[in-house]
Amino acid sequence: MHIKKQYLSDWKKSEKSNMPTNTFNIESIVRPHILKLKPYSSARDEYTGKSGVFLDANENPFGSVSGEAFNRYPDPLQKAVKEKLAIIKEVKPEQIFLGNGSDEAIDLLFRAFCEPQKDKVLLLPPTYGMYKVSADINLVETLEIPLTTEYQLDTEKILSLIEKENKVKLIFVCSPNNPTGNQINLAEIEKILNNFSGLVVVDEAYIDFAPEKSMVHFLDKYPNLIVLQTFSKAWGMAALRIGMAYASKQIIDLLNKIKPPYNINQLTQEKVLEALDANELRKQKVEELITLRENLKNALLEMPLVEKVYPSDANFLLIKVPEATKIYDKLIKQLVIVRNRSSVILCDNCLRITVGTAEENTKLLKALAEI
Ligand SMILES: *Cc1c(COP(=O)(O)O)cnc(C)c1O
C-alpha cells in the first residue's frame, strides 16, 4: 500500500487533483485563517528518516530513568498505526486522523470550521453531551432539532432548517446514538449529506456493536462526511485516549495542521498497534458483549420495576422505570452505579446501563430486585 509521506505540505496541491464532484467546497467552509495557517513544523516533520545520530529535538540521549525507551518524541502522524488501521477499515491512511480520544477530533472540528459567535452547529438531542460542551468552549451557537419519539432523525425539519440557515457548518449525528442506543437510519443520514453544504459528522463510537455497517465506506461518495470512531469502547482501551476521524484527505490534512504536534503518545501508539494485531480476538469479545446485552435485556424485561427496555445496537441499554432518580439513588446505596438520564429530553425516567461482565450484570439484577 502506498503511504503518503507528506500529509501536511501537499494540502495546496491535493486540492486541485481531488476536487469534490458535488457542490461541496471545503474552501468555502473552512475558517479563512486556518486555511492560510502555516503549521508548526516539528523536528520529526523535517527529518523523517529512521537512522542517524538524532541531535535535532533536544531529547535526552540516556533514555528515561524508568528504564524504558521513552526519551524520543513519538511519530506526530502515527503512520504505523494508520497503515494497519487503514487495512482493517478499508480506507486510505491519509483518510485517517488520530486524536486524544474522539473528543479531541470533535474540538478540532469546531476550531477548523466554526467562526466563534458567527457560525453555528446543529445538534439532534437526546445525544452525546460533548458536542454541546465543545461548541460552548469554542463560543459557537448550537441549534437543536430533537429526534422523533422513535429516536430517529426528524429529516424534514432538519432539511428545512439548513435550507434557511446558511451559518450552520456542522451537524452531529450519533449512530448508534448515546444515550438511546439505536442506530440512525442510513437513508435519512444520506438525505442530509446530499442536501447540506457543511459537514455531517457521524459519531460511530458504538458501531462495532451494531448490525449495520460503518459509514466509512461512504467517504468517497460524500466529501462532506466525517466519521468518528474510538478505541474506548469495542477495543476496550478508554484509558489510552485514542479516537479516530475518517474523512477526505483535505479534511484530514486540515485537522493534522491544527492538532498539537505529538497528540498521541508513544505508549498509546505501541499498545494500539498490538491491539490491531488482535483484531480477531476483539471481534470475539464484541460478540460476547452482544450476547451479554441480549441476556441482560431479557432479564430486565422480566422485572416488574422495568417499564421499557429500548432496542440497543450498542454496549448499553436505556431503560424506563417509575421514579428513575429514586431507583438510581437506591442502586448507588448498593454500590451499583448506572447513569441517570431522566433529565434529558425524550428520556423521562430513563436510566442508561452499561453492559458489564456476567457477574456484574447479575449484581445489577439482584440490586434491582431488592428495590
Ligand atoms: C464514549 C463516546 C465517545 C468516546 O470518546 P473518546 O474521547 O474517544 O473516549 C465518543 N462519542 C460517543 C457518542 C461516546 O458515547
Image: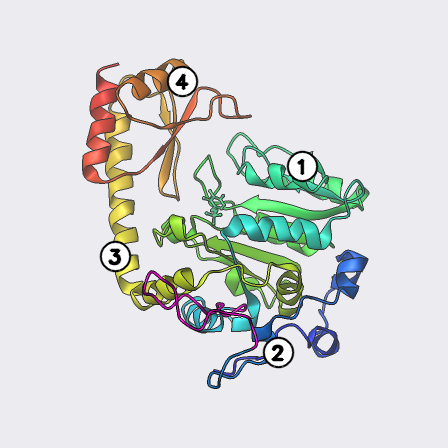
Q: Amino acid at mark 1?
A: Asp
**Residue 62 among those drawn in magenta:** yes
Q: Position of residue 284 (x, y in %)?
A: 25, 57
Residue 326 visible within the image: yes
Residue 191 visible within the image: no
Q: CA distance from mark 3 to mark 2?
A: 42 Å
Q: Amino acid at mark 3?
A: Gln
Does residue 303 sit above or below 298 in this rendering? above
**Residue 70 among those drawn in magenta:** yes
The residue where tag 2 is placed is: 46
| Mark earlier in primary sequence (2, 4) | 2
- Say few, some or many: other residues with alpha carbon within 10 Å of mark 4 (under 14 / 14 to 19 / 20 or more): some
Camera-nearest residue between 48 and 181: 48
Q: Amino acid at mark 4?
A: Ala
| Mark earlier in primary sequence (3, 4) | 3
* Secondary element at image label 2: helix
Confirm or reject: label 2 Cβ below 8 Å from ligand 1.
no
Q: State if disc 4 and disc 2 touch (CB < 8 Å).
A: no
Q: Position of residue 292 (x, y in %)?
A: 25, 41
Q: Position of residue 189 (x, y in %)?
A: 59, 50
The residue where tag 1 is placed is: 136
Q: CA distance from mark 4 to mark 1?
A: 29 Å
The residue where tag 3 is placed is: 284
Q: Is residue 299 left or right of residue 260?
A: left
Camera-nearest residue between 134 and 279: 134
* Secondary element at image label 1: helix
Q: Which mark is residue 324?
A: 4
* Secondary element at image label 3: helix
* Secondary element at image label 4: helix
**Residue 220 position by quadrant:** bottom right
**Residue 141 position by quadrant:** top right
